[in-house]
């Protein structure tokens, strides 16, 4: 069932094929998924992990194909919260400040793509337009090329990193994608690979 999501994630539409016709339905959506690191859920905890470590995690997450995983823009590992973590002070940036940065970034993107009904946000851009709006500075390009070679990023993965880096730059209020934006985008891409 998961594999059937590959085409809708990529194209933003679903095609229903019957003997006499093919019907295309638009379906732009935001996919958010969560998974345990392994079947028992304790892979990163040596005191509680099962006897099959690390094969348990490889088998469990191996059910998600590489092509499907390649379509996820952000991959974030969320470690368990310890009792000591509950005593930590609140985050320095609250939800109000984050919401304001997101609204400002969305306004920048709305202005960037004004008059384009097919493109609303950075995630919708492709080809030459993506290369134009998300072109990193010299250091950012060098980092991205180094990571692409070292970790074997696919063309899809490479372009997804560029889109995420452009969005991070928008959240930062930066006109150009710089090395720190690329580095952050790459960190979200490679968390599941390490």
Image (cartoon, rainbow, N blue to C red):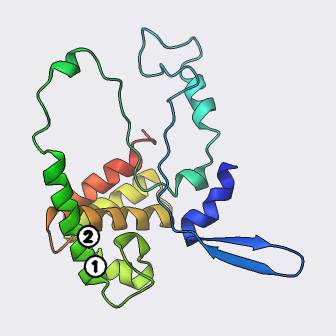
At 39% from the left and 42% from the top, the residue drawn is 191
Give the residue furthest to the top.
47
Q: Position of residue 53 (x, y in %)?
A: 54, 19
In the picture, the quarter occupied by the C terminus is top left
Residue 104 figure quarter = bottom left
Residue 73 figure quarter = bottom left
Foreground residue among 56 and 25 = 25
Q: Position of residue 86 (x, y in %)?
A: 21, 21
In the image: residue 153, left or right of residue 16 = left
Residue 81 visible in image = yes
In the image: residue 175, left or right of residue 18 = left
Residue 17 figure quarter = bottom right
Label 1, on which residue? 110
Q: Vertically, is 76 above or below 118?
A: above
Label 2, on which residue? 106
Q: CA distance from mark 1 to mark 2?
A: 6 Å
Q: Residues within 10 Å of mark 2 (few under 14, many from 20)?
A: some
Foreground residue among 5 and 106 = 106
Label 1, secondary structure: give it.
helix
Q: Position of residue 23 (x, y in %)?
A: 73, 78
């Amino acid at each position: 069932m998961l594999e059937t999501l590959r085409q809708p994630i990529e194209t933003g539409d679903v095609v229903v094929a019957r003997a006499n016709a093919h019907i295309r339905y638009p379906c732009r959506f935001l996919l958010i998924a969560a998974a345990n690191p392994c079947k028992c859920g304790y892979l990163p905890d040596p005191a509680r992990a099962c006897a099959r470590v690390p094969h348990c995690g490889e088998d469990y997450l191996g059910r998600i194909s590489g092509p499907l995983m390649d379509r996820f823009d952000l991959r974030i590992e969320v470690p368990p919260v310890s009792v000591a973590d509950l005593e930590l002070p609140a985050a320095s940036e609250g939800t109000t400040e984050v919401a304001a940065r997101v609204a400002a970034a969305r306004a920048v993107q709305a202005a960037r793509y004004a008059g384009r009904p097919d493109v609303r946000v950075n995630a919708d851009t492709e080809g030459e337009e993506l290369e134009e709006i998300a072109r990193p500075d010299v250091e950012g390009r060098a980092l991205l090329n180094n990571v692409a070679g070292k970790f074997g990023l696919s063309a899809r993965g490479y372009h997804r990193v560029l889109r995420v880096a452009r969005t991070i730059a928008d959240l930062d209020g930066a006109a150009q994608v710089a090395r720190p934006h690329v580095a952050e985008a790459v960190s979200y891409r490679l968390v599941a690979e390490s």
